[in-house]
Image (spheres, coloured by chain):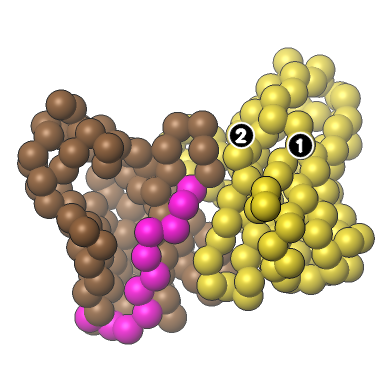
Chain colours: A brown, B yellow
Amino acid sequence: TQLLEQSPQFLSIQEGENLTVYCNSSSVFSSLQWYRQEPGEGPVLLVTVVTGGEVKKLKRLTFQFGDARKDSSLHITAAQPGDTGLYLCAGLNDMRFGAGTRLTVKP
Amino acid sequence: NAGVTQTPKFRVLKTGQSMTLLCAQDMNHEYMYWYRQDPGMGLRLIHYSVGEGTTAKGEVPDGYNVSRLKKQNFLLGLESAAPSQTSVYFCAVDRKNTEAFFGQGTRLTVV
């Protein structure tokens, strides 16, 4: 079992601020995925990172996969209230998820 | 095109009762998963299936059984419900570890 630890568990910020959330493991992953879940809905895939050191951008979201493929980060620039949600990382090999970071962006 | 449909959406059970949750997909994907989601604990994998007629245990399988008699359906059974099984249950489908598509969830309360 490859355990994923996410931090912080909760994050509350003002609109326009930048933030970074993390997904860490002691194990090496062939690839990691980030999902976002809104209240009352199932998670939806944001990105898959595969190569160590890889950086992917999705509008104001920047995802990075660590060089050793044991960790990943999600950076949001100029957060908006629409970014509010639960951000989950998952190991693609076994589809197991971290506990998530619950982000609240206040207008 | 409904994608992944979970039935029912809400249910209240008494301790000791049994029930079956149905996950139906029209995406023709091989892999199907059942998760439970509790506050502060993210999604925990209960059971999964990599194809019709196959099932395997996940992280938290105790108290649950599953069946995958048809490719499009994955059933999760609770034989004797306990209050600890109060949770939101999500089904997901996946084409061989590429992207998981989730249903809307089933909110189960055991009293």
Q: Residues within 10 Å of mark 2 (few under 14, many from 20)?
A: many
Marks 1 and 2 share the same chain: yes
Q: Relative to B82, say whether B102 is above or below.
A: below
Q: Relative to A81, say whether A45 is above or below.
A: below
Q: Which residue is mark 1?
A: B7
Q: Residues within 10 Å of mark 1 (few under 14, many from 20)?
A: some
Badge 2 amino acid: Val
Which residue of the protein is positioned furthest toward the right in this rendering? B69
Residue A33 is situated, as x and y percent measured from the top left of the image, at 41, 65
Badge 1 amino acid: Thr
- Res B1 seen here: yes
Q: Which residue is mark 2?
A: B88
Residue A75 is situated, as x and y percent measured from the top left of the image, at 18, 56
Q: Quadrant of residue B20?
A: top right
Q: Quadrant of residue A46?
A: bottom left
Q: Is residue B85 left or right of residue A66?
A: right
* Relative depth, front residue between A106 and A51: A106
Residue B32 is situated, as x and y percent measured from the top left of the image, at 70, 61
Q: Residue at x 14, y 48 (%)?
A: A19
Q: Secondary structure at mark 2?
A: strand
Q: Relative to A18, say whether A45 is above or below.
A: below
Image quarter (top left, top right, bottom left or bottom right) of the C terminus of chain A? top left
Q: CA distance from mark 1 to mark 2?
A: 12 Å
Residue B85 is situated, as x and y percent measured from the top left of the image, at 69, 32
The region drawn magenta spans A43-53
Q: Residue at x 43, y 81 (%)?
A: A30
Q: Quadrant of residue B55?
A: bottom right
